[in-house]
Amino acid sequence: MKRYVMGNREDGLADILFEDELEPHFAENRIRELWLNTETPADQSNPADPVADQKMFHEPPDGGAVFRLLVFPPKQDTPDITPEQMVEMHKSIHSVHIPSIEYLRTAKHPTMHKTDTLNYFVLTEGEIWSLSEGKDVLLKADDVMIQRGCMHGWRNDSDKRAVLAAVLIDSDPA
């Protein structure tokens, strides 16, 4: 899996400006930022890669958007995570809404969380459960989920990894 970024060169012609391998990253980390814009409309004048060496933040900046890939390992390769570990993870990625330990102890899964974003998800590989506080949906490759600023979570019950492409757009709280 590769990332290609196309844009205008200094001479004004369109060309591939960046390309990199994504798989080596997934051996170490299950989330890879692909692109980030800090405002809308996006400023196209900066030739730099906005996610190079950038620490991951859960939500995009105010008025911005983030494009990322998330890899969910097979069930047998996923250790059980406690509510306490999830709260610490949310703190480390500066989540705006950090679920309480009490909520996570009674939630259907410890990955449940909320963001002030409009999310576009496309499952590109495998299958994964998209969790809500009501009905859950088993997404399969090529399925799409639009998630609108509400509690949600993810669970991979299969013996294969699941790869989810996500665009998170800053939004007013629901």
Image (spheres, helix red, strand yellow):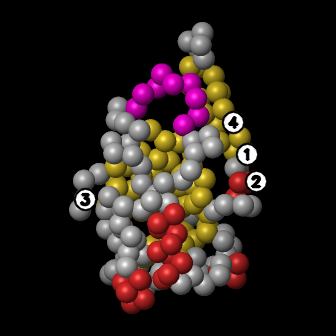
Q: Is mark 2 on a helix, strand or loop?
A: helix
Q: Nearer the viewer, residue 70 or 124?
A: 70
Q: In which quarter of the image is residue 43?
A: top left
In terms of sequence position, does the residue under pointer 3 or pointer 2 come before the other? 2
Question: Which disc is residue 173 wearing?
Answer: 3
Disc 1, SS:
strand
Mark positioned earlier in the residue sequence (1 or 3):
1
Circles 1 and 2: CB distance less than 8 Å? yes
Residue under the point 59% across and 34% down: 49
Nearer-N-terminus badge (4/2): 4
Residue under pointer 2: 24
First in sequence: mark 3 or mark 4?
4
Residue closest to the far bottom? 106
Specify the principal SS of the magenta part: loop
Q: What's the residue type where badge 2 is placed?
A: Pro
Label at residue 19: 4
What percent of the width, then of the height, locates residue 2? 69, 45
x%, y% of residue 89?
52, 69
Which of label 3 and label 4 is nearer to you? Answer: 3
Q: Which residue type carries mark 4?
A: Glu
Q: What residue type is labelled 1?
A: Glu
Callouts 1 and 3 close, C-beta under 8 Å? no
Residue interval drawn in magenta: 42-50
Q: Which residue is drawn at 38% across and 42% down?
A: 64
Q: Name the residue under label 1.
A: 21
